[in-house]
Image: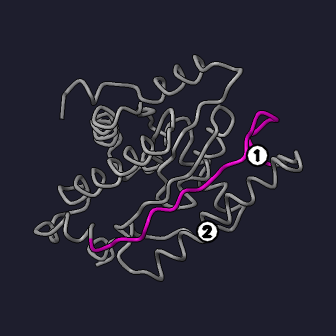
Amino acid sequence: MNPDTKRRNYSKETEKILKGLAKERAPRLLLHSCCAPCSSHVMEYLREYFDLTVFYYNPNITEEPEYEKRLAEEKRLIEAYNRQVETGDFTGMHSTGRARKIGILEAPYDPERWLRAVRGLEDCPERGDRCRVCFTLRLFEAARAAAEHGFDYFTTTLTISPLKDAPLLNEIGERAAAEYGVPFLPSDFKKKDGYKRSIELSQAFGLYRQNYCGCVYSKR
């Protein structure tokens, strides 16, 4: 990793981009989401600025019942947020009348592709090479989908987690952006109490909060 990457303030970079967005048209952003709790604050924040679509691509969730449970919670939260826009009732939310409805794009569930990608890395510690390969697979697929569907930006909710390496995620996102020609929105969503807010929103909506990332190796 480039040493300069660790010195960047991704949160400030996000704010600078948001301030520079044209007010007459909301750009389209494809948001890779790992789960409803992690996306809760990110969606609340970004729906004020973007025409937002959640991209649900998580082949790292190796047990199908767990995958379906997390996907259902994501859809439930999106539906709740969209009802707020329809009714104009944002009680308890950090939202305004600028908030827009959120769409969802589901990728096929393909855990076998993920298992092939991390073969040989089964015994790596958390935050090691297996996680790097996992992030790369998911963010490059998000970039590919963003290019295919004509989005103006893409990004990921993964930087909301204190356990995830934000500089690494941004570096991978920017490499994927260069390959597919869609700008990556830099982020460190945990900053400025973002992670704290995600916990508050998870409690408010009664979201299922899993205690592992999703893969069988993490669970073990």
Colour setting: one colour
Q: Nearer the viewer, mark 1 or mark 2?
A: 2
Q: Is residue 33 above or below residue 29?
A: below
Q: Secondary structure at mark 1?
A: loop
Give residue 153's mark.
Answer: none
Q: Quadrant of residue 192?
A: top right
Q: Residue at x 27, y 74 (%)?
A: 112
Q: Residue at x 52, y 22 (%)?
A: 17
* Residue 54 as seen in the image, left or right of residue 124: right
Residue 97 within the magenta-colored segment of the rendering: yes
Q: Secondary structure at mark 2?
A: helix
Q: Amino acid at mark 1?
A: Met
Residue 173 in the image, given as x and y percentages of width and height: 34, 39
Q: Quadrant of residue 201?
A: bottom right
* Residue 15 as seen in the image, left or right of residue 213: right
**Residue, disc 2:** 73
Q: Amino acid at mark 2?
A: Glu
Residue 213 within the magenta-colored segment of the rendering: no
Quick one: quadrant of the C terminus?
bottom left
Tell me which segment is drawn in magenta: 92-112
Dot 1 crowding, Cα within 10 Å, few <14, some 14–19, many 20+: some
Q: Which residue is the extreme one toward the left?
A: 120
* Residue 90 as seen in the image, left or right of residue 11: right
Q: Which sits in the foreground, 160 or 29? A: 29
Residue 167 in the image, given as x and y percentages of width and height: 31, 37
Dot 2 crowding, Cα within 10 Å, few <14, some 14–19, many 20+: some
Q: Quadrant of residue 58?
A: bottom left
**Residue, disc 1:** 93
